[in-house]
Image (cartoon, rainbow, N blue to C red):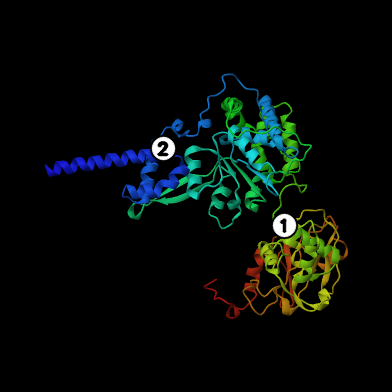
């Protein structure tokens, strides 16, 4: 009798647990995250086990049952929808309630429609609604997006787990307002958001405990709109199209926006769904023409929007192209990484001063003198520090070192030489080739590797500064000089006649015998007083071969 009672009690307990798990699995992801600890304690089980049971139960739920927000339940419009007219109506909606920059209404209409077909593309552009201060209309625009985008939900914050679980199960449009937390580089959510702009964005997490641990992969690919004061991190901004909002003036007349869903929003959602159902296959096959003035990343993030514009036709291809160039073109309107902005300021000061070297103190003073740049208030309202300059230049492999009075005109101090920046200037500050001359006994000119007869500068370093900086990694030998010039120098006899000859051959690397190319230039290196032309990748091997084995830092076997 006792065994039978125990069996019944156990069965009842299991039934109660199953019923509780079903209730928990029906909760929105964010709500479940807030109650899971308490629920696990109430059911006398580990949190990881409860997560596993709830995950299994969620997998059983049919897709319509995950439409837990009322405006997610959408029936397609019964008749075919004119895409151009639909975009016109979306554009008018934003202009009716919001004061936005020029071309922003075009972008908002295209972006809202793209959320209904983002699975047709490999990339979904992020949307950033930014402002310099409060009350500029960011939340208003995001509210409209919440009601017209596909399965959109507007949140002020989401945990790491909530983001990837929500994206995997619900395939939503995330509308994240007041996202100051997104700007924290140490926040683990950065990686999830950065990877989720492309179809191949995933996170892998361990679930369960001990022998029951399993690895589960979650997709992070879905449309995301951010609203914040200031800027996102450089990586996220590079994946986004920005709309910089400003406060409206007395001359700006717009209607007040109600915050609730309504019949107009519902009709727009129905028409968007019908157009999406009729256009999925056609959109996947469209390869829009790349507008002039967009870099590779800008073209990637605009490609879905340009494809939609081409699909609907009419005046929209022209509107979309104009908006892409205006908002993401290379004319400076697109957001630049702050480190590249610093490079631009440093180049301007070298050009203005004509010096071969600048002390760090002099350079910072010059940077802070430009009131339009952020450097005067970069350090929490104070001027940028030497350490902050060094940190921003570190990705370019540029480090400070001692510069002498005969180079700068001031007593010996830490600073930078222009020669160390030339490679970064050429790579990150595109411009027409120009003739640069500056003073200093260390400055020389050689014909550049493009053989156009245009001189560029290189710096021969003395023995005391052969590595450019005490902190730089040295070659494998300690007793040999190692000095590099600018790219693709030509021999002196070619430099003297301008290097213009059509029959002249490009410089050749003495180590591998291959000629210099645009992708693989050679550099002039000094070893024991002799100069050699070497590819950058060949320098370490050449230096190592030129040293007797007994003098090398490592043995031949270790090499």
- Looking at the rendered structure, the secondary structure element under dot 2 is loop
Residue under the point 75% across and 34% down: 253
Which residue appears at 32% of the width and 38% of the height?
Answer: 19
Residue at left offset 74%, top offset 67%: 420
> x, y (%) of residue 141?
65, 38
Q: How many marks?
A: 2
**Residue, disc 1:** 340
User: Pointers 1 and 2 in contact (CB under 8 A)?
Assistant: no
358 versus 88 height, above or below: below
Residue 104 location, quadrant: top right
Question: In this view of the protein, which residue sits in the foreground, 228 or 170?
Answer: 228
Residue 260 is situated, as x and y percent measured from the top left of the image, at 58, 32
Q: Alpha-carbon distance for marks 1 and 2?
A: 48 Å
Q: Residue furthest top?
A: 79
The quarter of the picture where residue 373 lies is: bottom right
Residue 164 locus on image (x, y percent): 49, 45
Question: Which image quadrant is residue 515 in?
Answer: bottom right
Please name the residue that numbered disc 2 is placed on.
26
Q: Is residue 14 left or right of residue 22?
A: left
Quadrant location, the C terminus: bottom right
Vertical placement of residue 251 versus 161, above or below:
above
* Horizontal arrangement in the rendering, residue 2 relative to residue 416 (left or right): left
**Mark 1 surroundings within 10 Å by alpha-carbon count, few (fewer than 14), some (14 through 19), many (20 or more):** some
Relative to residue 403, is residue 200 depicted above or below? above
Q: Nearer the viewer, residue 330 or 136?
A: 136
Rendered location of residue 319, percent (x, y): 74, 33
Mark 1 residue element: helix
If you read the primary sequence from the N terminus, does the residue marked by circle 1 or circle 2 appear first? 2
């Amino acid at each position: 009798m006792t065994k039978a009672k125990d069996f019944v009690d156990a069965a009842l307990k299991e039934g109660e647990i199953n019923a509780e798990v079903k209730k928990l699995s029906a909760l929105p992801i964010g709500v479940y995250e807030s109650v899971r600890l308490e629920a696990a304690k109430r059911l006398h089980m580990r949190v990881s086990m409860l997560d596993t049971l709830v995950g299994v139960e969620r997998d059983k739920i049919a897709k319509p049952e995950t439409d837990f927000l009322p405006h997610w339940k959408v029936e397609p419009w019964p008749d075919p929808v004119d895409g151009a007219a639909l975009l016109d109506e979306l554009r008018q909606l934003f202009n009716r309630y919001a004061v936005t920059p020029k071309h922003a209404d075009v972008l908002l209409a295209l972006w809202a429609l793209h959320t209904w077909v983002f699975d047709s593309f490999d990339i979904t552009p992020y949307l950033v609604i930014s402002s310099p201060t409060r009350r500029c209309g960011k939340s208003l625009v995001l509210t409209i997006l919440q009601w017209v985008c596909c399965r959109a939900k507007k949140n002020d914050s989401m945990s790491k787990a909530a983001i990837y679980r929500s994206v995997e199960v619900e395939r939503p449009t995330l509308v994240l307002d007041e996202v100051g937390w997104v700007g924290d580089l140490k926040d683990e959510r950065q990686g999830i958001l950065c990877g989720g702009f492309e179809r191949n964005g995933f996170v892998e997490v361990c679930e369960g405990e001990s022998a029951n641990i399993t690895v589960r992969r979650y997709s992070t690919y879905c449309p995301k709109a951010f609203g914040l004061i200031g800027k996102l991190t450089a990586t996220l901004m590079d994946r986004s199209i920005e709309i910089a909002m400003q406060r409206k003036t007395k001359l700006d007349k717009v209607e007040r926006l109600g915050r609730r869903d309504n019949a107009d929003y519902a009709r727009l959602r129905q028409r968007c769904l019908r157009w999406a159902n009729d256009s999925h296959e056609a959109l996947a096959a469209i390869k829009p023409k790349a507008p002039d003035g967009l870099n590779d990343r800008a073209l990637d993030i605009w490609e879905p929007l340009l494809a939609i514009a081409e699909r609907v036709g009419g005046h929209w291809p022209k509107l979309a192209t104009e908006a892409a160039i205006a908002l993401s073109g290379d004319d400076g309107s697109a957001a630049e990484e702050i480190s590249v902005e610093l490079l631009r300021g440093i180049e301007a000061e070298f050009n203005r001063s004509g010096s071969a070297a600048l002390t760090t103190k002099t350079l910072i003073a010059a940077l802070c003198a430009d009131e339009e740049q952020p450097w005067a208030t970069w350090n929490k309202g104070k001027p940028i520090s030497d350490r902050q300059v060094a940190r921003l230049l570190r990705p370019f492999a540029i480090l400070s070192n001692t510069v002498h009075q005969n180079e700068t005109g001031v007593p010996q101090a830490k600073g930078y030489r222009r020669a160390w920046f030339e490679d970064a200037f050429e790579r990150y500050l595109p411009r027409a080739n120009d003739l640069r001359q500056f003073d200093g006994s260390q400055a020389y000119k050689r014909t550049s590797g493009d053989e156009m007869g245009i001189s560029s500068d290189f710096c021969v370093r003395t023995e005391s500064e052969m590595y450019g900086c005490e902190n730089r990694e040295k070659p494998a030998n300690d007793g040999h000089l190692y000095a590099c010039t600018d790219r693709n120098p030509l021999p002196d006899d070619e430099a003297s006649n301008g290097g213009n000859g059509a029959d002249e051959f490009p410089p050749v690397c003495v180590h591998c015998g291959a000629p210099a190319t645009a992708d693989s230039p050679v550099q002039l290196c000094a070893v024991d007083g002799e100069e050699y032309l070497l590819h950058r990748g060949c320098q370490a091997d050449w230096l190592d071969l030129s040293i007797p084995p007994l003098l090398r830092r490592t043995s031949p076997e270790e090499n």
